[in-house]
Image: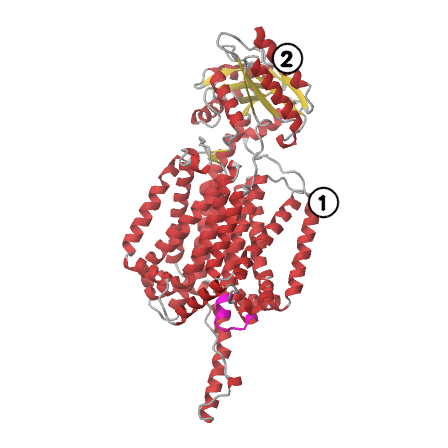
Amino acid sequence: MSTFLYRLGRFSYRRKWTVIIGWLVVLCALGAAAVTLMKPFTSSTSIPGTEAQRASDVLGEEFPSGSDGITGQIVFRAAQGTTVTAGPEGEAIRTATARIAKTPGVESVTTPSAKAGNVSRDGRTGIAEVTFTTEKSDEISAASVEEIEATADQARTDGLTVALGGRAFDPVESAAGGAGEAVGVLITLIVLILVFRSLRAAVVPLAMAMVGVALGVLALLTLTSVVDMDSTALMLALMLGLAVGVDYALFIVSRHQTQVRDGMDPEESAGLAVGTAGSAVLFAGATVVIALAALTVVRIPFLAIMGLGAALTVVVAVVLALTLLPAVLGLLGPRIAFSRIPALRRSAHRALDKQRSGAVGVGIRWARLMDRRRWAVLLLGVVGLGVLAVPAADLRLGLSLPSTNAEAVRAQKMTDEAFGPGYGGTLVILVEGDGRKATESAAKEIARTAAELPDVASVAPARLSGTGNAAMVGVVPKSGPESERTEQLLHDIRGARDELEKSKATEINVTGSTAVNLDVAAKLTDALPVYCLVVMGLAVLLLTLVFRSIAVPLKAAVGFLLSLGGSLGVLVAVLQWGWFSSVLGTQASPTVISFLPILLIGILFGLAMDYEVFLVSRMREEYARGKSPVAAMVDGFGHGSKVVTAAAVIMVSVFGSFVFADMQITKGMGLALAVGVLLDAFVVRMCLVPAAMSVLQHAAWWLPRFLHRALPHVDVEGEKLTHQQARPAEADRDLLASRSQGMGGAVPADQRVRPLPQAN
C-alpha cells in the first residue's frame, strides 16, 4: 500500500495541473447536479417498525385530517375574574381569530371554546390553533406573520395577554453560527502558522478542507433527490469534513515540509510523505468511515443517513489528501520549506538549528515526565475522567428540544400553567377491530382503564373512524412529554391492553408525537450498547493488526471508554442539568437529543484511533529498531506529539465553534465532539498513553506466536517504503566509499550522494 501511495503522490506532484483541473471538473459537475437535483430537507425522525410509528400510519389512513399544513398556537389569557369565551374578552378573541382566518397563507383557525377542549378549567386561558397552507415554518411569508402579530397586538390592547407558539411561530434556527465558525477557522489558521512557521504552508490544509467540505456538501445535496435527508446530516458532514480535512492534510504537509527542509528533492519528498504519512491517513480515515458506516447496523434510517453522509465527507477528505494535496505541493515546490515573512523564516531556521544540534524538545521532556510520574498520572487521569463521567448515569434520551425563542417559551409556559405540562403531549390509543360494535366497545373499555391509571389528567371520549374499524382515544398526561412519569404511563397503558385485546378480539396500540418520540428514544437506548460493543470490537481488531500487540489495543479501548464517559458526563451536566447555560447559550432540557451519544461514540472512536495510530506507531518503529521500551516511548512521543497536539487543537476549535450556533442540535453536537476530542487527545493520548506504555514495558509489544503467524502485516507508517528508499542510497554510499579509497579518499562533488533523511 505504501509503495502504491508513494507512486500516486509522485504522479500527482508531476501532473499537478491535470489533477487540479480534474478536481475542478468534479466540483463543477457536482455543483450543477446539486442545483438541478436537490430537494428540500425533511424533518422526520420516525423509525419504521416501532409500535407508535405503525399506529401513526394507520391513524393517518383512518382519520385523515384533510390538511398537511404546519400549525401554530395563539394563547390568550384573560384578566382575573373574566373568561376568554364571554364578555368583551370573548368578543375580542373571536374578532382576532376571524381576522387571522383571512390572513394570506392561513388555511383555518380554531376559536377557543369549552366544547373544543381548548379552554382551561377556570375559563381564563384559551388556545387558538392556526393551520397554514404550507408544511414548513420557513415557507410562511413574513407579511402573514406580521399581520398575525399585529392582530395579537390589538388583542393585547383589549386587555388580553397573548403569546404565539408552536412550530409555525417558532422561527427556524440557523444551522450555522456565523461568527462562531469564523473564529474556529481563524484559530485553525493560527495553529497551522505556528506549526509550519509559514503562511503559505498553513493555508494549504485549510484550503484542502474547504474543497473537501464543498465536494461533500454538494454530493449530499445531490443525494437528496433519492433519499430523505435531515438538515442535521448536512451540518454533521460539514463539521466533521472541515475538521478531518485540515488534520489529514496537516499530517502529510508536516512530513513533506520537514523532509524538504532536510534537503530532500520536493518531488521525492511529496511521494514519500504520501506513502508514509498518507498510509496513516488512509488507515485513520478508514476507521472513522467504518465507525460511521456501522451506524447502519442499528437499523434507524435517519441515523444511518447521518452516518453515511458524514462518512462520505471523510472519504472525500482522504482522497483529496492523497491526490489533490500533492498536486498543490507541486505548485509550491521548494517554497514549502520556508516562509517569505522574515519573522516566520527566522523562527523556522532557529527551530531547525535546535533540532540539528540535538536539543531536547518539549514533547520529549513531557514524555520523560510521564515516565517518572507514571503511576500518579494513571491514577489522576482515571479518577479525573471517572468523576467527569458521574453525570452520565443520569443520561436520558429524547427527541424534543427546548425553544430559544422568548415568545414561544412564554406561550408554552402559559399553556403549562393553565392546562398542565401534559397538554401538548397527548397519548393516542388506537383500537382496531372487525366491526363498529366490537371496536367501539373495546375503545370505551380501554378509555375507562386509562382513566384509572396514575398521572392521567383527562381522557377524551372514544372517536370512531368512518369505516368503523378503528377508534381513537386521547389521554392527556399530568406530566410533560419528556418526563419519566409520562414514559411510565405509556408502559402502563400498553401493559393494560393485553387481556382486553384477547377478550374483544381487537388490536390496541398507543401513538401520538409523545409516544413516537419515546419509542425512538427507547430504540436508540437499546442500540447504544450494541453499537458500542461493535465499535470496541472493531477497535481491538484493527489495532491488533496495526501494532501486532494485545496490550496496546486493549489500552486504546480502555482509554476510549474513559474519554467517552467523561464526554457523556459533561454533555449531561450542560444539556440536562443546565450548567454553564448562560455562557454557552444552551437551554436545559429533561433529555439529551437521542442520537447524540451514538454519534459521539462513532466519531470519537475514529478520531481516538487516529491519534493512537499517529502516536504509538512511531513508538513501535523505535522499539523495532532495538531501543528500550521507555526510550522508544519517549522518542516516538517526541516525534508525534507536536502534530497530534496541533491536530487536536484544530479539532476542538472547529467543533467548539459550533457551540455558538443558533440551532440547539448543532450546539449539542459541537459541544459533545469538542469535549470528546479535548479529553481524548490531551488527557488520554498525551498523558495516559505514555504513562501506560512506561508501565507495560516489553509487555506492550507482546503477541502470541500463533497470532503473529496468522495476522497480515499492516504497514501503516510506510516503514517498508522507507527502508526500500534507504537501501539504494546505502548501496550508493558503499560504492562511492570503495571508489574513494582508490582515489585517496577524494570524491568528486558531483558524485557525492546526500543521505536520505529518516521520515518523521
Which quarter of the figure is the N terminus placed in? bottom right
**Disc 2 marks which amino acid?**
Thr
- Seen in the picture, residue 626 relative to 175 is either above or below; the reply is below
The front one of 718 and 526 is: 718
Picture quadrant of residue 565: top left
Residue 380 can be seen, yes or no: yes
* Label drawn at residue 36: 1
Label 2 neighbour load within 10 Å: few <14, some 14-19, many 20+: some
Badge 1: residue crowd in 10 Å (few <14, some 14–19, many ≥20): few
Colour scheme: secondary structure
- Where residue 758 appears, as percent x and y from the top left, is 45, 71
Residue type, label 1: Thr
| Badge 2 element | helix
Residue 436 horizontal/vertical position (percent):
62, 15
Q: Main secondary structure of the magenta part?
A: helix
Magenta segment includes 710: no
Which residue is labeled 2 in the image? 95
User: Which numbered mark, 1 or 2, is in the foreground of this view?
Assistant: 2
